[in-house]
Amino acid sequence: MASRVCGTITGVVKGHIHANVQVLWKSIPLSVVITRESCDDMNLSEGDSISVLMKSTDLILAKAFRGILSARNYIAGVVVSILRGDVLSKVIFESQGETLCAIVTNASLEEMNIQTGEEITAIVKSTELILFRNKEGISMNGGNT
């Protein structure tokens, strides 16, 4: 499962192999690293609207986080529900009016004592985010519109 948010590109820095794309999702800046070839193929420029996909298994959850990590993206939110499985749990949280989800082990859920209504921070590395822009005439499921 992936969460999708829409934002605006605020900067593109192209290297020889990779590109760093800065996206502003409402008030949260997101940093996304993609290949230079993908950046060129998508013709990304400052001011463009873009969707950012976050796989639920790539989000790391933290409570009362105070520190510095190499991960560039921090998304503050409030837990709205928890769907517990045999081994893994889906933590559904809200940030900036959007619903996102993270998959965590039950052991982590218990150790962190994550509860509905609590504030959490989702952390994700720039290389784990996916940029998506719908091409005209192609729907989200790949069929023609």
Image (cartoon, rainbow, N blue to C red):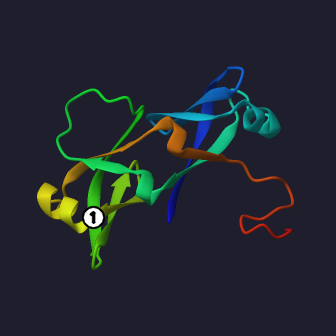
At 15% from the left and 55% from the top, the residue drawn is 112
Q: Element type at marker 1?
A: strand
Q: Residue 131 is drawn in which quadrant?
A: top right
Instruction: Give the answer, above or below, for where 24 lies relative to 60.
Output: above
Q: Amino acid at mark 1?
A: Thr
Q: Position of residue 62 (x, y in %)?
A: 24, 46
Q: Residue 140 is drawn in which quadrant?
A: bottom right
Q: Position of residue 17 (x, y in %)?
A: 70, 26
Q: Position of residue 56 (x, y in %)?
A: 44, 59
Determine if residue 9 is in view: yes
Q: Nearer the viewer, residue 17 or 131?
A: 17
At 61% from the left and 30% from the top, the residue drawn is 21
Q: Nearer the viewer, residue 28 or 74?
A: 74
At 82% from the left and 70% from the top, the residue drawn is 143
Asked if residue 138 lies left or right of residue 79, the reply is right
Asked if residue 20 lies left or right of residue 43, the reply is left
Residue of label 1:
105
Asked if residue 109 lies left or right of residue 15, the reply is left
Q: Nearer the viewer, residue 69 or 17?
A: 17
Question: For the residue carrying disc 1, how many other residues have a C-alpha within 10 Å: few (<14), some (14-19), or many (20+)?
Answer: some
